Amino acid sequence: MSQTSKLAPGHADPVSGPNAVDPGDYYRKVCHVPIPDQSGAKRPKIYGYAEPRICTPPLRALTPDTTLGYDVIEFARDALGVDLYPWQKVLLCRMLELLPDGSLRFRTAVVLIARQNGKSTLSQVLALWFMIVWGWPLVMGTAQDLETAEEVWQGAVDLVEEDEELSKLLKRVVKVNGKKALELNPQEPQGKVGKKTGPRYKVKAANRRAGRGFTGNLIMLDELREHQNWEAWGAITKTTMAQAEALILALSNAGDLTSIVLRYLRKMAHEAIGDPDGICEEIGAAGPSALDVADLTEDDEELDDDELADYEQDEDTLGLWEWSMAPGTDKRDRQGWAQSNPSLNWNPGFTERTIAAACKTDPEWVFRTEVGCQWSEGTLTGPFPPGAWDKGKNPVQTLDDGTIGVAEEHRIVPGSEVWAGVDQSHDRSMTYVAFGGFRADGKAQVEIVAARHGSDWVKGYLMDVKRRGRVKAVAGQSKGAPISPLMESLDADIEFTIPVVEWSGSDLTNGWADVFDSVRDVTVFHNPQPVLDTAAATAVVKVFSGGASIPDHRASPAEVAPLMAFTAVKWLMGRRVVAPPPPPPPPEALQTADTDFAADDVAQMGF
């Protein structure tokens, strides 16, 4: 299809957001193609929008001198034989914008788009361009499901192997499970960071071990919506820390309340461009906390401000490009479909009829998320009455020292006694410790204080001199749970001097009933903590025949162990401790007038 300056309906204004900069005529000419002639058609086709509905605006007009996108578009067409869709061209030009010094403007690029629109092809083209043309030594592709990352990688391998010229660059393809890699011969790169060793494209599963030991340049994370904690993000993205130039590309459909990393990045980007959808007031800051960072660094030492800053996202180097239905759009609105599905009808197999079928059969929020790329905040789900959990959440504010946190009156009294609750994820990979105590106003408060892999660290953590003097008792499910062996071990350990209280049977369901009532009635408070907030918003409750209930580890979409640790603490705090009866007085000699009192006469004393 020829490239002209004529734009498709709904595409005539590529300016997005209140602070956008007109990308220029050259950009329009290359990135947009005309709608085919539909005169005489009973119902003209609706074509997907090339421009994202929301995006980080460019700093200046996008020309071959100000973005690498045009180079990648030509490479795809001439070297790979791939004719990119209009939206893919738009994204490349915007995402690969250059600063005046010639360096990439963005280090973190977040792309939100509905499924089946061509994210994989875009990833393959970008990976090969950075390897072959720009000479970046290591490209790493990840996904929550390793098989998904391997499929994208295999597509790139096929593009190289099936082209006569590109195949000459091929050194080898490693297809061993867990070590798959595409390796090219050393070459003279056009970029600034090339090395004499050949470029490599490796795939890894998105977990806390991904990327450790590697130094990467292009990191591609597919379906970032599935990252429900900071483990994989911290492990993978820190591989770029030592690189002068690098790009972290996160491609995903819309997420939900459990999508901790994606929610944080999207909120930051929306905030930077004026909060066009009004989401920044609705969702608070959810970036990695000191708790998350401590786990990622595998270090029990206190983290200083510089270490924490390494994990904070720099909004100046963060870019967002979001194709989605606008809030409040009717799910049957076909222009809304075109906003969230930019490949609509540009791909002959991806038609309005396909989307219409899904619209009729899918539950509304399945359709809105998967096809409309709209976010479900999960406000009507979870075990608590809608809004109840948030009512007990302490407000976050800017403190006197300039940091973000909770005020002194919303903290457990420093140095006061606390109770500890412990629980472990259903796969035994993570253990959570919660502390509960009372604030200066006498109100109960519970918060997660530690979350780390395994459970061997729990004894040392609780017995540390900084904490041991405060902890009155500890509880975790005593029987039939992943945490039960640890509780049994602590109870039997003579070196562990904190009382271990048995928590089992009806005490479990009574504890959960107390938490439910306390959250509903706002008699217990807690700090904003993503791992706890997510568990509280999404936990699935198992109901027993008598009506008693308890959160279900396996049935819940997100990990509920933080909420169970919370419940153990709250139960401990409200547990009625029955004082043992005083010991009997020492026996006294029986005084009788008859010193020859017979044993048979004892029966007459009324015992």
Image: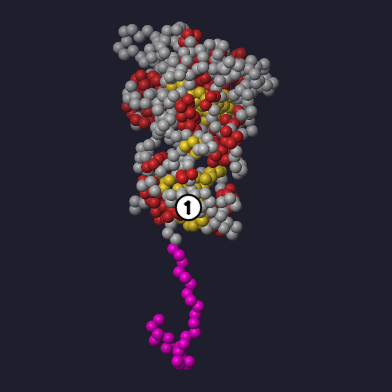
Near-viewer residue (222 or 258): 258
Range of residues picked out in magenta: 578-607
Q: Residue at x 50, y 17 (%)?
A: 58
Residue 67 in which image quadrant: top right
Residue furthest front in the image: 400
Percent across and percent down for residue 492 are 56, 58
Q: Residue at x 35, y 42 (%)?
A: 385
Q: Residue at x 47, y 85 (%)?
A: 590
Side of 44 where 415 appears, left or right: right
Q: Is residue 482 above or below residue 213?
A: below
Q: Please, what is the dominant secondary structure of the magenta stretch? A: loop
Side of 127 where 259 appears, left or right: left
Residue matched to label 1 = 477
Percent across and percent down for residue 15 are 44, 15
Residue furthest left in the image: 42
Residue 209 in which image quadrant: top right
Q: Is residue 73 above or below residue 545?
A: above
**Which amino acid does the dot numbered 1 rest on?**
Gln
- Magenta stretch containing residue 596, yes or no? yes
Q: Quadrant of the C terminus?
A: bottom left
Residue 495 in which image quadrant: bottom right
